[in-house]
Image (cartoon, rainbow, N blue to C red):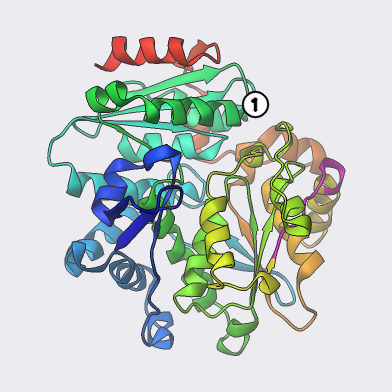
Amino acid sequence: MQLHNLKEYSQKVSFVDAVKTGLGRNQGVFFPESLAPLSDVDALLDMDFVTRSGKILSHLIGGELPSDTVAQMVKNAFNFPVNLVEVEDNTYCLELFHGPTLAFKDFGGRFMAECLAQFNQGEKVTILTATSGDTGAAVAHAFYNKPNIDVVILYPKGKISLAQQKLFTTLGDNIHCYAIEGSFDDCQELVKKSFLDEELKSKLGLNSANSINISRLVAQVCYYFEAIAQLPKEKRATAHISVPSGNFGNVCAAMIGAVIGMPVGKLSATTNQNDTVPRFMLDKNWTPNATIESLSNAMDVSKPNNWPRVQSMLDNNWFSYDNFYSVSVDEQQTQTVMKKIQQLGYIAEPHTAIAYQGLVENKAADAVGIFLATAHPAKFKDSVEDILNVELDMPKPLADALAKPCLATDMHNDYGILRTELFKKLA
């Protein structure tokens, strides 16, 4: 797989180098120069999830890894189910929360861990990532106690749910967590500054596990094919998929799937009140506002790092602007939609409800719709129980994490302080 830096096209790297580097020069993200279509998609859709995923990832990665190696990596990473649940006629929910940390990011986090285990050969690596909720847990669990790897997680203090936080701040050992006084965008900015610091990068072997890392992105392509495979064959080509979108990596993966041949009609990237992309789609002006806190905190992002990848595919007409939608859903509407879905016999947390609303607003009447459930409702237990007047059962991974003490360190939003701390602890 040949990739280039979307900010500095002259920087071209292999898949292996892109995974190990994370972020390109000038804070640019890596993206393939081209995406070749798959052959015989119908045959792929008849395969089981793990077998199909190995073939899709081998196709995307190219000849850099033997196909049997990729197949084993996928088998190790994707060892939990993907469920497509019909919520109402012609409308399905894709449940991506059946992994160890009950969120969709288990797919990308675990595949990235498999990649680095293959590529690093004992070299010291420090994974530095920011999280708005679920990335932290997925990455922490994927790399927990991996030899020669330290993980540093930055998260906005007081702005993610307790359940989300406890899943990664209670591990200790090689997992180091910092509660930053600021927003998720502030955390992302600290990560970006770290990657511009050549001394820090070199001495700590910095890598990022945010969705800017191409290994996480390609892994997520696989569950969209699984969603389509679980639909009746006659409905696949008209499918409209709605993705709750914050940093825009998830919908980027869906678009990659469409480009390489996945049968799908339309895509929606539905946001909360952090509506930079919906406004861009109206006037093509990129004008991020200050980040607003919301019930759907994992989407509280006003400067999505993955948007350049999505825009590249749209601008190059790999996927048509005519089939791409982005609307925002406010707090009151989110709660109303959660109640509506409950009346259909399904419990949805805020992010899932936002995806459902984006589907309702844009799906053609004769199309089949898929909206994503990116996290288990219990990860947002307080808000879900309060809004829906229900009592949720607590899954064992969450119950165990909630019973443990938080090991995170509070930190001012100051790069100098972070730099000093990282050198002291990890250099």
Residue 174 in sight from this viewpoint = no
Q: Residue at x 23, y 22 (%)?
A: 203
Q: Residue at x 47, y 42 (%)?
A: 101
Q: Can you name the residue that lies furthest to the bottom here?
A: 234
Instruction: Decide which of 411, 335 is in the foreground and name it.
Output: 411
Residue 241 placement, left or right of 104: right
Position of the N terminus, as image quadrant, is bottom left
Residue range of the region highlighted in magenta in the rendering: 325-333
Classify 231 as above or below 392: below
Q: Position of residue 245 (x, y in %)?
A: 63, 51
Total marks drawn? 1
Instruction: Decide which of 410, 21 is in the foreground and name it.
Output: 21
Instruction: Decide which of 63, 283 is in the foreground and name it.
Output: 283
Residue 3 placement, left or right of 221: left
Residue 192 in sight from this viewpoint = yes
Position of the C terminus, as image quadrant, is top left
Q: Residue at x 44, y 16 (%)?
A: 407
- Classed neighbour count for the residue bearing mark 1: other residues with Cα under 10 Å, few (<14), some (14–19), many (≥20): many
Classify 68 as above or below 353: below
In magenta segment, residue 229:
no
Classify 163 as above or below 1: above
Q: Can you name the residue that lies furthest to the front here?
A: 10
Q: Position of residue 377 (x, y in %)?
A: 64, 45
Q: Position of residue 257 (x, y in %)?
A: 48, 70
Q: Amino acid at mark 1?
A: Lys
Residue 367 placement, left or right of 175: right
**Residue on which the image places disc 1:** 159
- Element type where label 1 sits in the image: loop
In magenta segment, residue 331:
yes
Q: Quadrant of residue 70?
A: bottom left
